[in-house]
Structure formats: C-alpha cells, structure tokens
Image (cartoon, helix red, strand yellow):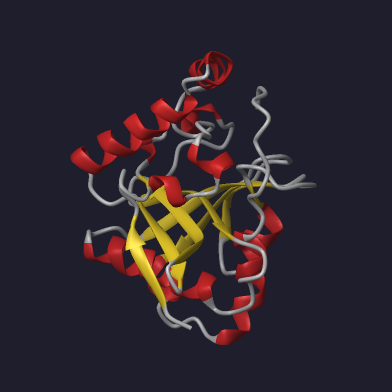
C-alpha cells in the first residue's frame, strides 16, 4: 500500500470530500457563512480562503493518498485566519498555538495508522515553523458527524482541556508529544478523524 501526504493547495482541493470542499463553517463568520451557503458561493469562498492563507501564512492542510486515491485530510491555521474561531465562548486560541480546524479519514481506511502519521506530519510542520501546540474547540455534546470534533475523542488522543465549557471546551495538544506516539493511540485517533462526515448545520453557538 503506497501512501503519501501532500500539502493542501487549490490544485488538490477537489480531492476533499464534496461536502468538505464546499463547507465554509470555519472559513467565514456565522452570518457570512450562512449567506454563502444560501447564495451558492460556498465553494468559491472556500477556494478564496485557501488561496489567501497559502499566500499569507503558508501550508494550512494535508491530503492523504493511498495508492493515489484521496482518503483523508487535515486543515489547520492560526485563529486569525479562522473567523468562526472568535464565535466560541471559550475563545481565544492561545497565542503560541495553531487551531486544528477539522480532519477526516474515509471509512474503510481507518485503523491503518493514517491518522497518526497525518497528525505527526502536521506536528513536524508546525514545530519547524515555531509553534508549540495545537488547539481545538471540542463538542462535548457530540452526537453525530459535523465540523466540530468530539471533545471526548480529542482527550483520548492526548488533548488536555485548557478552558472548560458544557458544550464547547477548548483543548490543547503539545506538539512534541505527538512525535513519540505509539500504535496504542491509533484506534482513538482514527475515531477522532472519522468524526467529520456530514454537511454542517449553521446555527448560533
């Protein structure tokens, strides 16, 4: 099985699941996001966001391929580039951290260590760029796949709660700890990265 991780660009944006390639839950503020979905411009807004972040900050994602088939991806960026980030009651993300925006592994490819490799690749990239940690807003009431990752699954792979909240706690993972992960975290990580599957419902937090 040949597998490779490639930086996310406009050229391979179409390799994301269709629902993810046109999702602007994180990339726009709640009002603008709802307007883009209703106006049918979400895909264009997603492309514009990727382009702007690449030009200004650099690589903001990875796409995972197995035998040339796209099977997963991860998206991350400093919170200044993530308008939705400021809408959470547990904002802001710490100044030394990058936000884990979302991630996904296609069903059928979970349990193969892809999640661990993907997150470790992101960790190495961010450590090289001077960041110490990655943070995420978890969903403590998670019931079904959406743009927010379940808080319980985040803690299962090493994230620690830095600001509690009954619905949307903010969690943190020290990047250096990911470099020494062993196979015993793979199952939990695959569950975490397999949790983003459905089109999000835009609603107030």
Please provide percent x and percent y for residue 60.
33, 49
User: 76 or 114: nearer the eye?
Assistant: 114
Residue 99 can be seen, yes or no: no
Front in this rendered view, residue 16 or 153: 16
**Would residue 188 appear left or right of 33 to someone viewing this image?**
right
Residue at the spot x=47%, y=57% of the render? 73
* In this rendering, position of residue 125 left or right of residue 175: left
Residue sitting nearer the eye, 115 or 79: 115
Residue found at the very far left of the displayed protein: 55
Q: Position of residue 167 (x, y in %)?
A: 71, 39
* Residue positioned 49% across, 17% down in the render: 32
Number of numbered discs visible in the structure rendering: 0
> Which residue is painted at 57% across and 61% down in the image?
160
Is residue 117 visible in the rendered image? The answer is yes
Residue 187 in which image quadrant: bottom right
Q: Estimate the x, y position of residue 194 in percent, counting from the top left.
A: 64, 60
Above-or-below relation of 57 to 27: below
75 above or below 64? Answer: above
Indicate the quadrant containing the C terminus: top left, top right, bottom left or bottom right. Answer: top right
- Residue under the image location 57 percent in, 86 percent down: 183
Measured from the top left, where is residue 82 in percent x and y? Answer: 41, 35
Name the side, left or right, on which 128 lies relative to 35: left
The answer to whether 149 is drawn above or below residue 4 in the figure is above
Residue in front for this viewpoint, 146 or 93: 146
Drawn side of residue 69 relative to residue 205, left or right = left
For the view shown, which residue lies furthest in the front direction? 68
């Amino acid at each position: 099985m040949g597998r490779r991780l490639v930086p996310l660009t406009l050229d391979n944006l179409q390799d994301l699941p269709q629902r993810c390639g046109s999702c602007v839950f994180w990339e726009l503020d709640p009002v603008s996001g709802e307007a883009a979905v209703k106006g049918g411009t979400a895909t264009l807004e997603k492309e514009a966001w990727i382009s702007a972040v690449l030009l200004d900050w650099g690589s903001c994602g990875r796409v995972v391929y197995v035998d040339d088939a796209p099977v997963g991806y991860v998206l991350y960026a400093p919170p200044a580039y993530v308008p939705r980030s400021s809408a959470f009651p547990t904002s802001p993300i710490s100044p030394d951290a990058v936000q884990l925006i979302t991630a996904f592994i296609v069903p059928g490819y979970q349990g193969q260590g892809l999640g661990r490799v993907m997150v470790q690749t992101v960790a190495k990239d961010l450590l090289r760029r001077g960041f110490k940690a990655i943070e995420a807003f978890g969903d403590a009431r998670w019931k079904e796949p959406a743009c927010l990752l379940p808080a319980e699954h985040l803690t299962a792979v090493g994230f620690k709660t830095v600001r509690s909240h009954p619905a949307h706690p903010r969690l943190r993972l020290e990047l250096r700890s990911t470099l020494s992960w062993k196979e015993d975290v793979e199952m939990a990580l695959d569950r975490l990265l397999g949790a983003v599957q459905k089109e999000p419902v835009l609603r107030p937090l």
